[in-house]
Image: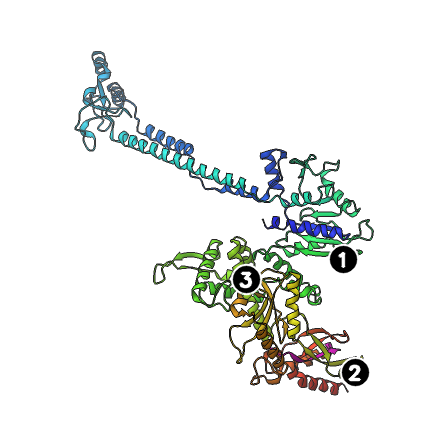
Amino acid sequence: MCMSAKVPAVVKLAKEALAENKCVVIGLQSTGEARTEEAVTKYGVEMEDFVSGPRELLLKLVEENYPLPPKPDTFQQGEEKVTEIQRKRHSPQDVSFKGRVRKVAKMEDVSDDDSGDYSPSESSDHESSESDEEFHMCQICNSEEEKSLLLNCSGCSLRVHPSCLTPPWTGMLTDDWSCYSCKKIEGQEMEHDANVADFSKRYDSAVERKLKILDVIRSLDLPNNPLDDIIDQLGGPDKVAEITGRRGMLIRASDGKGVIYQARNAKEVSMEMINMHEKQQFMDDKKLIAIISEAGSAGVSLHADRRAKNQRRRVHVTLELPWSADRAIQQFGRTHRSNQTSAPQYRLLFTNLGGEKRFASIVAKRLESLGALTQGDRRAGPSLSAFNYDSTYGKKALTMVYRGIMEQDSFPVVPPRCSDNQASIEEFITEAKVALVSVGIIRDATVCNGKVAGKLSGRIVDADMHDVARFLNRLLGLAPDIQNRLFDLFISILDVVLHNARREGQLDSGIVDIKGKNIELKEPPKTVHVDSLSGATTILFTFTIDRGVTWESAKAMLDGRENDGAGSSNDGFYESKREWMGRRHFTLALEGSTEGIYKIIRPAIGEALREMPLSELKGKYRKVSSIDKVSKGWQDEYDVSSKQCMHGSKCKVGSYCTVGRRLQEFNILGGLILPVWGTIEKALAKQVYQNHKRIRVVRLVTTNDNQRIVGLFIPNAAVESVLTGLQWVQDIND
């Protein structure tokens, strides 16, 4: 469903790229071939429309996993086998007086001659004089008796004396008499028949429910298989080169009515060579769109090779990111290789479902580990880092989320769409617990019956407390509403964790871009060290940075969005609900590229690094409609922030504090750095405040002459200590 939701965006990006004289490569992982072949088996090679992958998956899930009771036929056959065994066990052979005589005769052959028992001749005389059928053996006491004096079971033919039974039989001797065992079996058979009827009824009802569910699924308007849908919307197989592992495809019939299934190698090309044939069609500029899957893209080069006819710039659209970042990079490499005329443009598509962002998280983590791609590139670094949730900070944030939901700690932020009152937070916690139980994160769940009746309790194992990948994975199994709320909570807490780490000087951000409305050199650069061997110099740059936004600029931003019709109803100026240092603060909120997430512009520091969800914005601020009130408050804050930080004149750090200060003095040590790195590190380690101790690489561009400077940031409080250390190194060298 997530893939299908992205098909319109893929088609739009592809058509835009073609209009710009570029070509397109679309990457995915699964082709849906299994669902297509199953549908062809069920419906035939000619169908009314393309196969819906989600529908076929749902049908298969219900058909194979819907719980049915035991089938009555199987149950009855098993019971009949047991009854037959019992019948044979209780059915002895008829023992007559004649048989008794034969048995005695055999006994006399091995006994003494003077025995007083029957002899064969006597037996023979008796046989001739009286019928054998008049006497039978009691099968309990083994004594013979006249037939009329023995009970004869109509079920198992048992013959016994009435007094030998337990309890003794005192009733009339009838022809349809049944022994106690047969009566028990007859009762069981009657009960069995009733059970079989009940099982049949239950089985038929379950089958009927299953068929109803299958009918409902078939009636749902679910999207088509993404691969077939994309090929169809982009012109069919004649326009799109398919480089996948599947053997057949669905294409639209020539008359436009319905679709037909055909093999991919329909044009006299062997199945083993079809991918190479399709790849060559793309490289020869005969097809401008290529779709590659993991199974079909191994070893295939689709870059803008100087030796190929198709040297258009590639736009690589990723419809489905893989589980492994290594595989993603492998697929990216199909369009980015040596000897190319231009580098590809990458478009990573994923929905706004919180759980699906895990794919971007995995890829970002892997790309960040490459170092140069992100740490050295000011454009790649921030964008990829924004989606790397599986970090030390992400694990810490997840632990805080879980502890808050399990009510072991309070949340550091107000959960999404909750007000400050405790009732709404408790309602969210209950919903979150139910959701996490349903996906197996909370285990051994029970409902309390004590003081807080109906309250859900359970446990989260230690291994899951910091497993971000599992958290994001399990989110996909939740309904979108609670899924996004849980993800937004996680992101909000992660922002708090990152903010605290940044404030304490522990956040490694790679190369940090310093931005401001106005960046100028305060004084000429000063040479503070000269290397004795190379003659290279270390230079101290001191800049004045104005980060603020004037009232006129802020008003123009809002008016511009309103005139363009690009704004949202929640765009506008806001006033803080709480006072800080005796006054309320004003801010401008503008909705960003993601719905419900707002850019925050403040008078003193301009655009904040962190965007704010609408729920948090409304929780901390209230919208102000009075332009005069906002204008005065904005201008006051703009003026005051030029002289002091947001902590006021009594700040413990004094003039060195830059929090909320509009005008800042910024020191960068550039030029030769590596030989004196250790000296700078020692000087910073002596500082009192934690955020002054860490070495940070920064980069800025002056606004008056566009001069680019890259170097180490030196806090104002540490400048003297660093210069002293460098002078000591200079003296030693001299």
**Amino acid of disc 3:** Asp
Residue under pointer 3 = 488
Label 3 or label 1, whichever comes before in sequence order:
1
Q: Secondary structure at mark 1?
A: loop
In percent of width and height, residue 352 lies at 59, 56
In this rendering, would 416 be left or right of 731?
Answer: left
For marks 3 and 2, give the one nearer the viewer. 3
Q: Which residues, given as a range, are shown in magenta? A: 660-675
Q: Where does the image place residue 231, in percent across and percent down from the top left?
A: 68, 44
Q: Is residue 667 part of the magenta span, yes or no? A: yes
Nearer to the camera, 680 or 310 = 310
Residue under numbered circle 2 = 532
Which element type, helix, strand or loop, lies under badge 2?
A: loop
Residue at the image point whose x is 59% and y is 37% from the top: 39
Q: Which residue is mark 1?
A: 343
User: For the residue labelled by badge 3, is the local secondary structure a helix, a strand or a loop?
Assistant: helix
Q: Is residue 366 magenta?
A: no
The residue that appears at 55% across and 64% down in the rendered structure is 614
State which quadrant residue 355 falls in. Answer: bottom right
| Above-or-below relation of 310 to 274 | below
Q: Is residue 160 above or below residue 593?
A: above
Which numbered marker is on residue 671?
A: none
Left or right side of 492 for 340: right
Q: Nearer the viewer, residue 405 or 685?
A: 405
| Nearer-N-terminus badge (3/2) | 3
Q: Quadrant of the C terminus?
A: bottom right
